[in-house]
Amino acid sequence: MEKAFNRQKVLLAHLQPASPCPSISTSICAAGDSAAYHRTAAFGDDIVIVAAYRTAICKAKRGGFKDTHPDDLLGFVLKAVVEKTNVDPREVGDIIVGTVLAPGSERAIECRMAAFYAGFPDTVPLRTVNRQCSSGLQAVADVAASIKAGYYEIGIAAGLECMTVNSIKGVPKVNPRVEIFQQARDCLLPMGLTSENVAQRYGLTRQDQDQAAVESHRKAAAARASGKFKDEIIPVTTKIVDPETGIQKVVTISEDDGIRPNSNLADLSRLKPAFKKDGTTTAGNSSQVSDGAGAVLLMKRSLAAQKGLPVLGVFRSFAAVGVDPAVMGIGPAVAIPAAVQAAGLELNDIDLFEINEAFASQYVYCIKKLELDPEKVNVNGGALALGHPLGATGARCVGTLLHEMKRRGKDSRFGVISMCIGSGMGACRCFRERRLC
């Protein structure tokens, strides 16, 4: 407790206004060691998340969204955050969408179209952002920063990927100069080979990776069966076309369709390596190729209180870091400590972690490297079971984390979301529980 108070005093010293101001004061929150961060009377300036929703995540090319247009998919979640909060869409200062695979201008236009489908007036601007697998999380960071800077009061961060339509491809034309720069050349490595590099360099066995996949499916299946995902998933009414007859059927998709409740080590052990003849990365211990979208509504706490909106969580910090492209999967092991430190916290202060399971190899490495309690990490499964629609995953993780923190109440004060990023990076965002001292 004394250590927590001392850390708060250091933080509070930096928060004292340059000139006396009777309306602002600082105080220490005596709520236990896990509350080792500052509280101020100016809490109305907190950047908060008041809504976070997503579509189900479906298998690309053969799942529930295989015949759904990307702009329709995004339109559903944009409409949901407005309808479920009764926020006037005219008040939204900007919509930022994380998306990866489609050509930039093409996808940006589709996202703008989606905003109109969702009922936003033409006065509301929109842009896309691409930081590879963390694009959805980067969108949240960008909106939070813009609100903090005073550019606008309300913003929506979203994520979208339709891997049925846009597949992962290599760089079509490569500068010959890349041959004399090893790390530049490693940026072109297929992600599966970077997974193999992580496993080989850090001594991760095939069984380590297969066990992580089994656990991901087990936890995701349990969460789905108990109805945990219902708080974050919005049902999507769409069509599915029979590839043989061409007959269209109207369906409502409300559950992730990549979860395999019966996943087991025996079955996974029979799968052949997918990227390297003698490798350990397989289709079973890699994230699934998926379609999905998510959206997050942010504003200042004072405005949320004025509108009578509940607070799901409070933004604390964000960090993006660079790592060796050949082992890009280790990104969370570097980004998490950076974001946690920026929040004035320590790793043992964090109650829940969402670490994207791009590959079991990098996921297992990050847990071991940071010595995290597995019971705190991906408690409802991760991308190995749910799927990884690249640009949407960050937004998906925000909803999954904050809804779980809400369910746990006072037992969950701080949460972290992190992921590795293609070409050698990592990103992390730190959230605080929604309540005040």
Image (cartoon, helix red, strand yellow):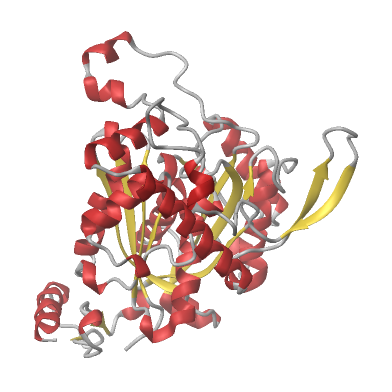
Indicate the position of residue 259 as horizontal and vertical percent values.
59, 55
Farthest residue, direction top: 176
Q: Quadrant of the N terminus?
A: bottom left
Q: Quadrant of residue 235?
A: bottom right
Q: Is residue 230 left or right of residue 207?
A: right
Residue nearest the viewer, comparing 95 with 124: 95
Residue nearest the viewer, comparing 261 with 400: 261
Farthest residue, direction front: 266
Residue beneath the point at 59% across and 51% down: 293
Indicate the position of residue 176 as horizontal and vertical percent values.
32, 9
Residue beneath the point at 23% across and 35% down: 324
Whether 258 is drawn above or below 180: the answer is below
Q: Is residue 87 left or right of residue 34?
A: right
Q: Quadrant of the C terminus?
A: bottom left
Indicate the position of residue 364 as horizontal and vertical percent values.
33, 51
Whether 230 is drawn above or below 204: the answer is below
Whether 193 is drawn above or below 171: the answer is below
Residue nearest the viewer, comparing 321 with 190: 190
Q: Quadrant of residue 41?
A: bottom left
Q: Is residue 175 left or right of residue 121?
A: left
Indicate the position of residue 399 as horizontal and vertical percent values.
51, 65
Residue beneath the point at 27% across and 12% down: 179
Residue 127 visible to an observer of this rendering: no
Residue 200 visible to an observer of this rendering: yes
Q: Quadrant of residue 60?
A: top right
Q: Is residue 234 left or right of residue 23?
A: right
